[in-house]
Amino acid sequence: MLRMTVTAILLALALSPAEAQEQTSKDYAACVDKAAGAAIPMQDCIANEQVRQTRRLQSALSALMTSMPAKRSQLRNAQRKWGDFRDAHCSFFDSGKVVQAVRLAANECVLNFTVQRAAELEKLKAP
């Protein structure tokens, strides 16, 4: 019973890639459109959106820690492990070679994970 409840909660919190895209800013969408697939401008778009989404993630994490003081240490530990996982997973896409498409995929991976995590933490805080 508990396992089913936990699974249901995790599924409710998960975002599909399309939902994650909806969570990005309008500035990001406009930047991507303007970049028209060119790698360097796309990297700039991703970098700028990563800054916005990191701030969003930090804000959601801070709000959640404030609302759940007894779980603060556990949440901090989970966040640290999540960051390690995100970085390890996304580095898989980066071959270490200076190939723009590969680097672009790795950076988009980090951005998408950050967007998803921010939304997940915001949902946890919601009543």
Image: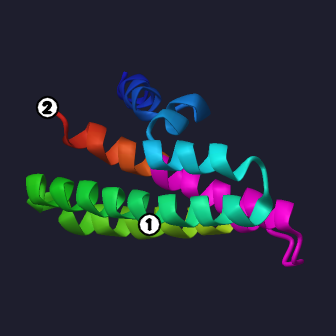
Q: How crowded is the residue under tag 2: few (<14 C-alpha within 10 Å), some, or many (20+)?
A: few
- Return the residue at label 2: 127
**Residue 98 counted in the magenta span:** yes
Q: Earlier in the sequence, mark 1 or mark 2?
A: 1
- Alpha carbon distance from label 1 to label 2: 27 Å
* Image vertical order of residue 22 relative to residue 29, above or below: above
Magenta residue span: 89-115
The kind of residue tagged 1 is Val
Indicate how the structure is coloured in the image: rainbow
Q: Residue at x 19, y 64 (%)?
A: 72
The kind of residue tagged 2 is Pro
Q: How many marks?
A: 2
Q: Can you tell which mark lies on residue 12?
A: none
Split into 4 quadrants, where in the image is the C terminus? top left
* Image vertical order of residue 10 relative to residue 87, above or below: above
- Return the residue at label 1: 51
Nearer to me, 39 or 72: 39
Is residue 104 among what the camera can see? Answer: yes
Please state the horizontal and vertical placement of residue 3, each as a whole percent of the image.
42, 29
Secondary structure mostly seen in magenta is helix
Secondary structure of the residue carrying numbered label 1: helix
Please state the horizontal and vertical placement of residue 57, each as a whole percent of the image.
35, 58
